[in-house]
Image: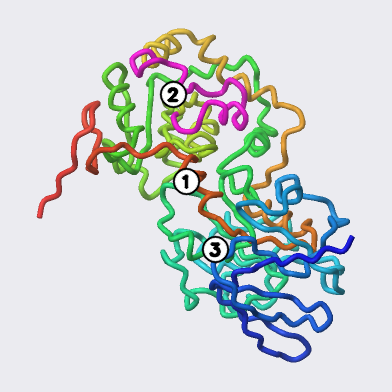
Amino acid sequence: MNLSLKYLFNTSLVIFPICLGTILVVHFTDKTFKQNRHSMILKVDFVPNKSNIVPQNHEQTLPTCSQDPKDDSLVNPFSKFYSVWYDPPTEKTLTKREQIKIVFWTKPQLQNRRHTRCLRMTNCIFSRYRDDIHDADAVLFEVSDLPKDYNSSTMPTVRYPHQHWIWYSTECPNYPNINFETYRSVFNWTITYRADSDSSGAWGSLYRTYQRLKGEGVDPNKDYTKGRKKLAVWFIMKCNTQASRITYAAELAKHISIDVYGRCGIDDVCAKRKYKCMNGIIRQYKFYLAFENMKCKEYITEKLWRNALENDVVPVVLGANRSDYERLAPPHSYIHVDDFTSPKELANYLKMLDQDKDRYNAYLKWKATPPKNMPLDEGRWCNLCRELLERCPTKRKVYTDLRTWFEGENLSMCDPKENVKYQELRFVENHFEPVTYND
């Protein structure tokens, strides 16, 4: 059956002919494009305030390449968050990519860092040079470095049809200070800590945690209490009255001794030699307070993965729902504050474990019993390389409502901040005090 459908794309395009092909200069405003299959030239029509953004001549049938289970729009083509379509195959898209190039458009200094690479995939190149954009497969935009409102002068002037523009954020929805509406239909992919991102940027995972244990010869009967005489420690950089973790920690500190380090604590001793220094301190304790700065769905950061689990210490977690920890963290590896009716009840439980080494060590048995069939996770940059290499070459996707996808309906992805006046705090002698600054 022949179908005649009109699909919309909120974009304005200018065509620049170069050598043997055409280059598309794209400025995202409230316009549409239609692709002429025969000439491969994009034409522009102005259609204001429309949300379904798909080229008019997109393929009506599902592709022969494998479908991404994360794309609910393959079942429902009119996803309220994004639109997906398939271009007709061309010689370029049918040719297997032997090499992938990713350009950091914002914060190009990230590329100099050792962890902003994928050493195991030599056919994946990361570049901090904007001039490399012409043959880049993906262009990365770190959200904290984007202007609040979309500004074409800060974006690439040329956009190639095969490129993926990627919105990248490791923070929770409460922090990106941007006007999402102005970025409508700009980004093709997302990298965040959430599992429903196009490419995983999670802070940690079962796979990576157990990979680090390989070769250690984990003893299932090891006594992890040996050499650990102190009870609880917390590294924290940001303390203020609007963070629910501060309210909880302040009450917990009335019942047990907590040593707090970092800018909020007694001493910022690890400011220069950060992680090596932190590890040496954390391993003196039995419990680590892995309290996230916000309570958001799946928001589980290095506080659990690196600070606690990699240091053979039992994390006490506050942040995402318990169901998220059950799904993402090693089994019986943490203590969730939601399991207790009050901070006092939690404090009594920690004091009991402090005196019972068998029950304490049970929280570290997971190290010797890796689960089967763990989802592959090679780190955010290797994940991205693999996703780009294995992507369906004719598939196209654009986010039409990034705000609702990221923040949730009615901001449902996160609990609200404490409704109190903002005040910076510092932990002094087992309680928090307001910070005062001298003029």
Question: In the structure shown, which secondary structural element does the residue marked by tag 1 occupy?
Answer: loop
Residue 14 quadrant: bottom right
Q: Is residue 375 visible?
A: yes
Q: Nearer the viewer, mark 3 or mark 1?
A: 3
Earlier sequence position, callout 3 versus callout 2: 3
On screen, residue 5 versus residue 349, left or right, reads: right
Earlier sequence position, callout 1 versus callout 2: 1
Viewer-closest of 310 and 384: 384
Amino acid marked by disc 2? Phe
Residue displayed at 56% across by 76% down: 27
Looking at this rendering, what residue extends furthest in the left direction?
Answer: 439
The magenta stretch is 318-345
Q: Residue 90's spot in the image, x, y percent? A: 85, 73
The residue identified by callout 1 is 172
Amino acid marked by disc 1? Cys
Q: Residue 4's spot in the image, x, y percent? A: 79, 66
Question: In the structure shown, which secondary structural element does the residue marked by tag 3 occupy?
Answer: loop
**Is 320 inside the magenta-drawn segment?**
yes
Q: Say if 283 sits above or below 242 in the image.
A: above
Alpha carbon of mark 3 to alpha carbon of mark 2: how far? 44 Å
On screen, residue 49 versus residue 162, left or right, reads: left
Alpha carbon of mark 3 to alpha carbon of mark 1: how far? 19 Å
Q: Residue 216's spot in the image, x, y percent? A: 66, 31
Q: Say if 397 sits above or below 434 in the image.
A: below
Question: In the structure shown, which secondary structural element does the residue marked by tag 2 occupy?
Answer: strand
Residue displayed at 62% across by 37% down: 205
> Which quarter of the rendering shows the N terminus?
bottom right
Viewer-closest of 357 and 244: 244
The residue identified by callout 2 is 287
Viewer-closest of 139 and 13: 13
Q: Nearer the viewer, mark 1 or mark 2?
A: 1
Number of numbered markers: 3
